[in-house]
Amino acid sequence: MAEVLVLVDHINGELKKLTFELLTAARELGEPSAVVVGSPGTAGKFKEQLARYGAAKVYVAESDDADKYLVTPKVDVLAKLAEQVSPAAVVAAATGEGKEVTGRLAVRLGGALLYDVVAVNSDGTTEQSIFGGAYTVKAKAAHGIPVISVRPGAVEASEAEGAAAEETVEVPATDAAKSAKITGVEPVVGGDRPELTEASIVVSGGRGVGSAEKFEVVEKLADALGAAVGASRAAVDSGYYPAQFQVGQTGKTVSPQLYVALGISGAIQHRAGMQTSKTIVAVNKDPEAPIFEIADFGVVGDLFNVAPQLTEEVAKR
Ligand code: FAD
């Protein structure tokens, strides 16, 4: 079976759960080989989990420098491996970094770039969701190695046995790789909370929250549930919450076990980023709000009455 190279996403020595989604998607096209680019000792901790999601091989590309530079070491390693093994495809996450890696890699390989896909099919076609989920575009690479970025949360991760046989790969020390050095990494607002696209629970607030100060009600419920905080674009545009927490077509896509929408109407562009959540709970004072069309549980009421009661009840448990 042909190899499919999968760029492993990790941060602070932890695997990101979207890596399991990438391995699952890659299995449609062949046998996934996980590619770990990081500082020495990174891959060893991941091996077991990578095997559990079907990684037949783990390419270990470790060096002191690998984490210090932006995307180029990853592009260099993937390009080198692609030339060596002629994979059926290269798969990475459609995150900011993953999109840059895949874009550069496709140019480097003269391959086809399939961007921000939500599904990968065994016949080699990929699916993109556009216009807020109103249309699905199917596309297939016409020549070269397909380089695919997969939207986080779009593919449901499933387990499959893999051998995770280790193979060491040298990280090329090119001048290009050293063109931009990371000088510091600092947590932003909400640093103690789970990352939005990784969280199994997300509590989001919309324009109905009314102000930046009142977003505290959203944060309190999120903290009681151990959740990430999200926001609608209207809440972001109104200055209630920072833009990196926006959920939707022009924000992040999330697919948690539980999504709680507080004071969010449920516009199609918001739904595009959260409608695949497993359970959706909506609190809105308008019984006609479109969010109730996709909610599993809905409360028609004032979020400033409902959310604090919910927070109190959760905190008791
Ligand atoms: P509103 O639509 O104003 O809804 C506020 C809701 O709060 C109402 O339903 C109201 O009944 C309820 N409410 C008010 N007070 C209370 C209260 N006290 N208690 C309970 N409920 C209350 N939007 C996104 O979210 N993400 C995107 O990525 C995104 N991308 C876009 C891209 C494009 C190209 C365009 C054109 C639009 C995009 N939008 C996006 C905007 C989207 O169309 C909506 O305008 C936006 O989602 C509305 O946000 P909202 O639900 O918070 O606000």
Image (tube, rainbow, N blue to C red):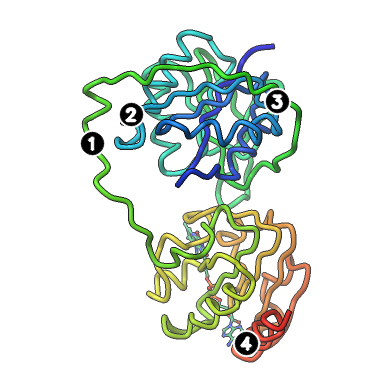
Q: Which residue is mark 4?
A: 308
> Which numbered disc, 1 or 3, marks the residue closer to the eye?
1
Question: What residue is shown at x 60% (from left), y 78% (from top)?
Answer: 221
Residue 68 lies in quadrant = top left
Question: What residue is shown at x 71% (from left), y 71% (from top)?
Answer: 281
Q: Which residue is mark 1?
A: 180
The quarter of the picture where the N terminus appears is: top right
Q: Which residue is mark 2?
A: 72
Amino acid under disc 4: Pro
Tell me the CA gap for discs 3 and 4.
45 Å
> Which numbered disc, 3 or 4, marks the residue closer to the eye?
4
Q: Is residue 83 above or below residue 271?
A: above
Amino acid under disc 3: Glu
Amino acid under disc 2: Thr
The quarter of the picture where the C terminus appears is: bottom right
Kindly indicate whether the residue at mark 4 contacts the one at mark 1 (C-beta within 8 angstroms).
no
